[in-house]
Structure formats: C-alpha cells, structure tokens
Image (tube, rainbow, N blue to C red):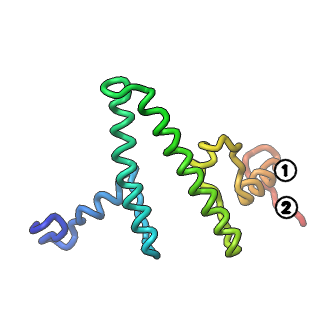
Amino acid sequence: MANGNVTTNPTEPTRWEIMARERNARVIRCNTPDTYSLLDLARNADRVVRALRNRLLVSLEPEQVVPLLARYKQAIVDLNDLIEEMSRTCEMEYRVPRSIRRMKGIEEEEPDNVKASTAKTKKSGGNGEADPVKD
C-alpha cells in the first residue's frame, strides 16, 4: 500500500470503501460547488461540536457552550427552512429530514405508503397480512 488508497490486491477494499461501510458514515455525491462548501462546514462543525460537548463541565462552563450550541442548532433549522423554500420555488418535492423534525419538535408523520400499508393491514383479519382491497 503506497499511500493508503492503492492496494496490491485488487479484491482488497480501499480505506475509503472501508470508511463508507461504517454505521455513522455518509457518502454524498457533490453536484454543485456549494455542496463542497457545505461538506467542509459539516466536517468542521462535527469536530468542534464534539469537542464542545466533551469539554462541557470539564474545562468549559455551560454559560459558554449552551448559547453556542443553541445558535448552531438554529442555524441548521434556518438552513432547512431555506432549502424548503427553494424547493417550493422550483416546484421540487422536499421532505424535512427526521432529525430536523425532531429539532423543531414536529410530530412524525407516516409516509403515504406506510399509511396505506397500515390501513390495508388493519382491514385484515388481524393476522398481520393484508386482505386484497377492493377499490
């Protein structure tokens, strides 16, 4: 392995492939230069927020940290609201991410396909299998 990315065995995964398999990893395709900027911000924010939370009550006072984390959370919610407005403007469908819904304290809605599946199952004889629905 010369630089961590090249392997001598073509069947051996690269370090990027291994990292992409991690539970908390996300792979994002960047379609615009703005996405690169957002990813740089997200990576830095992740590092700093983790440090703030780890140092809270150890070397940092809550009076210093809590207002910063509140502003950070509000910035995330504001960005979501802007993206939602932009989606409406160009008539694209937008679904608020579950994590943002939690931040805003919005009740979770079941997606239409889940509602339909649940409704069909409730009409069944109670065995968990949906009876054919006649329209």
As helix, strand or loop, the secondary structure at mark 2 comes to loop
Answer above or below: position of 78 versus 94.
above
Q: Is residue 13 left or right of residue 66?
A: left
Residue at screen point 89% across, 64% down: 134
State yes or no: discs 1 and 2 in contact (Cβ < 8 Å): yes
Report the amino acid beneath label 2: Val
Which numbered disc covers residue 123? Answer: 1
| Sequence-earlier tag: 1 or 2 | 1
| Residue named by callout 2 | 133
Along the line of sight, the residue nearer the viewer: 15 or 72: 72
Along the line of sight, the residue nearer the viewer: 52 or 4: 52
Q: Is residue 49 left or right of residue 95?
A: left
| Badge 2 density bin: few <14, some 14–19, many ≥20, Cα 10 Å | few
**Dividing the picture into quarters, in which one does residue 12 lie?**
bottom left
Across and down, in percent, residue 119 comes to 80, 52
Across and down, in percent, residue 108 comes to 69, 46
Residue at screen point 70% across, 68% down: 88
